Amino acid sequence: MTMTKDDAFNAMLAHHQQLREQVAHRVILLENVVVAGAAYDIVRAELVTYLVDEVLPHALAEENTIYQEAALRSEMATTVEAMVAEHRELAIGIERLASAANGPDAVQRALFVGALFAEHVSRENEVLLPALVADDAVDLAQLLAQMHQLTRTGHDEPTSIHNGSPTDHEAVVLSRLLEAATELARAGQGDRACSLVASVWATLREPRPDLASRVNLALHGLVRLVTQEPVAVRSKTTVNDPASDSVLDVRSLAPAQRHETIFDTYQALEAGSAFLLVNDHDPKPLRYQFEAEHAGEFTWDYVQSGPKVWRVRIGRALAGARSALPRAQRS
């Protein structure tokens, strides 16, 4: 049975309610344990784990689906910016909760995170989602399907340790690697961290597409931590006249379809030719993925850099040409 827009809207509301109730329940448990003077580390860890494994991936998936769709409407742009900022504030609050020095401090930070998330969800339910429902051009069911795909992680797999099956060791190792990459980015090595994660994505893309999807999500999050300007990747030999470029506008595609469409278009290029990519956000995560799979074989030139439209000329370098990007930045 085909899901209608109302079905998708109700499913999103139900999921938001579930997330809000689960967070509130864990916050209350932590508060009760601390008030009772009992050991609180395990309860705090369970709250942080739920926030990291469920809430943050959901938030990032929203940014890459319903937020992108809403931001295309000028009257919603300010609302979307504010809600993205709340996601960042939520992530910082979770980090501070995880590092709280004592019980009362942990409770204070947990209450802040819980209240912020509850207010944020209410704003989504009452402002952002109704605006998308009212727009006949929006396929809310498709956006919901893309959100599910983006948030599908190792705990959904039948190999989860919670159901008695063997642990998915690749997923466990990946989690540790992504944690290390995040710390590397926070230590000022954002470009190196993004390059590392992109290389992992390239390795997993075919044998473990489920994990590759998770890595792609993490890469977008890492890029947001990196404040440096995009690196222009160019070959030593220029490609043909830009006037002959074909145009690939992916703004109407679901986010999960965009990267594959772009890679397919690149694969069809002849040496020395290029296409013009048109996107609604900086495709920097894509650049790292190109560098992981096609280092030295492609050109990348920003033609327009926002604030609402990005245009990048992506070309296949002539034989023997190498990328001018310093090797240290490709590692």
Image (cartoon, helix red, strand yellow):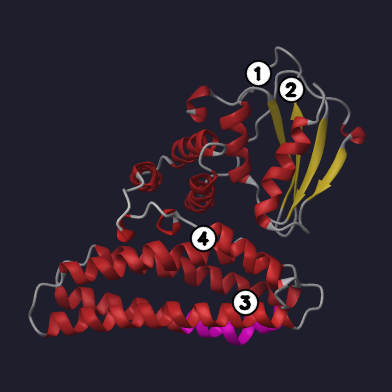
View extreme (top): residue = 320
Q: Would you say the magenta stretch is mainly helix, strand or loop?
A: helix
Q: Which mark is residue 322?
A: 1
Residue segment shown in magenta: 119-132
User: Label 4, on which residue?
Assistant: 151
Q: Which mark is residue 317?
A: 2
Question: Helix, strand or loop at disc 2?
Answer: loop
Relative vertical location of residue 241 with respect to residue 3 in this rendering, above or below: above
Q: Position of residue 296 (x, y in %)?
A: 63, 22
Q: Which mark is first along the chain, 2 or 4?
A: 4
Residue at image location 63% in from the left, 27% down from the top: 294
Question: Helix, strand or loop at disc 4?
Answer: helix
Number of other residues with Cα within 10 Å of mark 3, as a class: few under 14, some 14 to 19, many 20 or more? some
Q: Looking at the figure, which quarter contains the N terminus?
A: bottom right
Relative vertical location of residue 165 with respect to residue 299 in this rendering, above or below: below
Number of other residues with Cα within 10 Å of mark 1, as a class: few under 14, some 14 to 19, many 20 or more? some
Q: Which mark is first along the chain, 3 or 4?
A: 3
Q: Tell me if label 2 and label 1 are in contact, CB under 8 Å.
A: yes
Relative vertical location of residue 230 with respect to residue 326 in this rendering, above or below: below
- Relative to residue 200, is residue 129 drawn left or right? right
